[in-house]
Image (cartoon, rainbow, N blue to C red):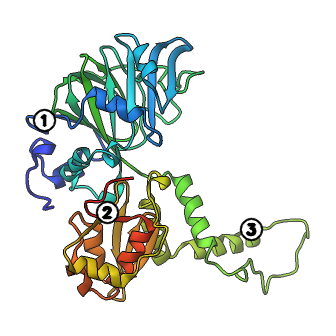
Amino acid sequence: MPSNIPLPVLGGLTAAEFLGDYWQQKPLLIRGAFPDFECPLDPDELAGLACEEGIESRLVEEHGKAGPWQVSHGPLDERTFARLPERDWTLLVQAVDHYVPEVAELLEAFDFLPRWRLDDIMISYAPPGGSVGPHVDQYDVFLLQGSGQRRWQLGGKVADDAPILDGIDLRILARFGVEDGDDWVLEPGDMLYLPPGWSHHGVSQSDDCLTLSVGFRAPSADEAITSFADYLGEQLPSSRRYSDAGMPPAADPTEIDDAAVERMRGLILETLDDPAQLAQWFGRVMTQPKYVDQLVPNEQPTDPAELVTALHAGEALTRSPGSRFAWRALDNGRATLFADGDGAECTPPLARALAGDTLLGAELLENEGAAELLAALLDAGSLTWDGEPDE
């Protein structure tokens, strides 16, 4: 997407302006980001998803029978919804874009950001007064009002160690003060962008309040270091070890001196400082599926020759719901396609096409190794035949 074209979804800002002035820096309220917006599903349909096995959902009751801010995890049932009061509760359903194609289509509006940064689209429903309390998220999020009205109040950026309420299954801030001017009621189609670490409180103002949260993933430093070290460790030979050849006699045999620490530091830094390996690890970790069990591998391997015949007959492949794809160019004129936490080398045009949004047809077979790669992705559950019913 060109970076210098004003985007309605950003209130007329260009992608470059938004990324330079707001992304991960400060909030942005966008009135009418989606003009004449019609929410792809209603509260009853969202409740139906929350009753299904395998779909992550939560019910938050501010005044629950078990205590304040009671949290129940799905799958829920009709009896649970039947007993709920007329106000002060919230239903949250994760990854609705994996199950409702019309919700997934909304992601096209966010193509000014890397697709591999996307986490999912969570949708929440709340009657009047419903909220999850003032809190902080450690990721970027766009809060799109789907139907009804929600009041949003912002409390500014808070420290990592800001005190939270004890004894509940939510990270609600113990103290929350509203910043001057950061108090709005959002109507359908309005959207609020929040960077990580910005305290906020959203309260439903109507009996049809649906909010779509488009969240973006970012590994923490501790997760990244641990994961990269594990990735490297699987490939390093056991012979690569600490070495101290040529060291002088020890003044004290029980002391770990500075020279020994520096040798160990050198080994670790030399091992970690490998840009090519870092890129391969990064592509894999950023395409790991949110729910591994959502991908359904084939029980029988696909015959590449039969796949070629089907594609030439007009059939097409598409990416499975919940699958994540990305690609990276290599120095040898090839590319790595990353799909659901794995990587495969192929031609750059093939990698780019597979990571894109279009249907995958016979034209891809012009690329070297395309049939075998498509068959492998189909067998892994990352691809599926277009028109096949979802499992």
Mark identifier at residue 258? 3
Q: CA distance from mark 3 to mark 2?
A: 53 Å
Q: Secondary structure at mark 2?
A: strand
Mark identifier at residue 37? 1
In this view, the mark in front (3 or 2): 2
In this view, the mark in front (2 or 1): 2
Residue type highlighted by circle 1: Phe
Q: Are marks 2 and 1 in contact (CB under 8 Å)?
A: no
Q: Quadrant of residue 377?
A: bottom left
Mark identifier at residue 282? none
From the image, which quarter does the N terminus lie in?
bottom left
Q: Are marks 3 and 2 in contact (CB under 8 Å)?
A: no
Sort mark 2 into few (<14), some (14-19) or many (20+) by Cα contacts within 10 Å.
many
| Residue 86 percent location from the top left of the image | 34, 10
**Sequence-first tag of 3 and 2:** 3
Sort mark 1 into few (<14), some (14-19) or many (20+) by Cα contacts within 10 Å.
some
In this view, the mark in front (1 or 3): 1
| Residue 308 percent location from the top left of the image | 29, 82
Residue type highlighted by circle 3: Asp
Q: Which residue is mark 2?
A: 319
**Sequence-first tag of 1 and 3:** 1
Sort mark 3 into few (<14), some (14-19) or many (20+) by Cα contacts within 10 Å.
few
| Residue 361 percent location from the top left of the image | 22, 74
Residue 309 in the image: above or below residue 322: below
Please name the residue shown 51% across and 76% down the image: 274
Q: CA distance from mark 1 to mark 3?
A: 64 Å
Residue 320 in the image: above or below residue 72: below
Residue type highlighted by circle 2: Arg
Q: Are marks 1 and 3 in contact (CB under 8 Å)?
A: no
